[in-house]
Amino acid sequence: MKFISYKKCLLLSLLVSLNYVGCTKNGQSGETVIKFTYPKGETLAEVGGTSLSLEGFREDFLARQGTFKGAPHLNTDEKKKEFVNNEVLKEAMFQEAVKLGYFDDPALQRDIKKIVVQKLIQKTLETSQNEYKPAEAEMKAYYDSNQNLFSRKEALKVSYMYVPYGDNKAQAKKVADELYQDATKKGLNGNTNEFVKLALKYMVPNAANNVKVESGHTDFQEQAAFDTKFGTGTFEKLKQTEQLGIISSVIPADQGYVVIMKNGYRKDINETFDEAKEKIAKKLAFDNRGKIYEKYTEELKTKYGIKIYEDKIAKLSEGVEMKAQANNQVAPPAGMPPVLNNQVGGAAAGTMPPAGANQAAKPIMGANAGEKTQE
């Protein structure tokens, strides 16, 4: 068993394979003693007099395999030995860090606290979201006001290079062929930005080419609009291409030739309210997280008797010379948790809430429902 004293309650089990036992406050000193034990069982390894159990290693080893748990290639003797050796060395490093006083470092304590808070937010919002049951009227109102999510035609999203016929159809075909060969030769399948950049050298007509190539990216377009832009039958032809990012051969359109890279396909949808109710309920529960977070934080303020001495806040920047700096940071949505400064994982302050807040679960529905895309 390890006894480590920190300022504030730090859940180190997120960083090392330890089991949390307890967190006890020492009076008014602001310090907390945290106790951890290693999983008990058959000893597999020893480090610094500490026994590490087979059961603890097994649980961690299998958990890391996720949805591929039990896959033969992840359970070879070599993989098992590699895992145990790495974890044993990590334990030795952890014990060395404790001995050298690394956990007295305020910066490390802050980082660990952020991980704990993110885990708490994630679990709280996830639980509340799963328990939320929207009323029938609320779901029907959402269905009626978002018909585009439940009734729409199939659509394609592409990147393209378009060569108008102009006064010289043969020259246009030659340029289109050159663009196609250039794209395939450079292996630009799936690279949408580099693909459209190939047209730059033809953007301004000159004596050599006498054409002006257009290039760009479309949003999702249904068949009528798509065929109007790229030629009758083009939608059906590209729809048959299952793999995204593949460059088409030169296609003759109504007024020019086009080379296309398919980036996305959206299926047609025609759902009744009864068919869509389950998805709507999940979507509304997801959208309700902001209110859940706001209510939860208000409860915490009361539960822990939070007091902030406003008159002292200005002193935070005392002794520091203020520098002019553009503020282009975006605040989180109203009611959503703020980003923790220097958040572990690298998110910049003020951009979006931490993992576990807005990412407790991914949206069930939305503008991308039924879409298959690649960027």
Image (spheres, grey):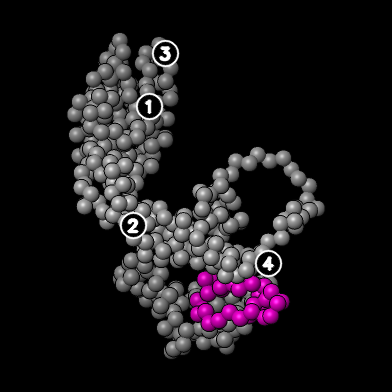
Which residue corresponds to mark 3? 206
Q: Which amino acid does label 1 sit on?
A: Ser
| Camera-side mark, 1 or 3 | 1
263 or 148, which is in the foreground?
Answer: 148
**Residue located 69% across and 80% down the image:** 27
Q: Disc 4 designates what residue?
A: 106
The three-letter code of the residue at mark 3 reads Asn
Question: What residue does disc 2 label?
Answer: 134
Residue at x 56% of width, y 60% of height: 344
- Residue shown at 41% from the left, 55% from the top: 288
Between the residue at mark 3 and the residue at mark 2, the CA separation in whole angstroms equals 63 Å
The answer to which of marks 3 and 2 sits earlier in the sequence is 2
Estimate the x, y position of residue 322 in percent, counting from the top left.
76, 45
Q: In this view, does 342 lie above or below 29?
A: above
Q: Position of residue 155 (x, y in %)?
A: 26, 37
Q: Nearer the viewer, mark 1 or mark 2?
A: 2
Q: Earlier in the sequence, mark 1 or mark 4?
A: 4
Farthest residue to the right: give it: 319
Label 1, label 2: how far apart the Cα atoms are:
46 Å
Check the image and report above or below for 214 versus 322: above
Q: Front-most of 26 and 240?
A: 26
Q: Give the magenta part as a residue range.
A: 4-33
Residue that numbered label 1 is attached to: 215
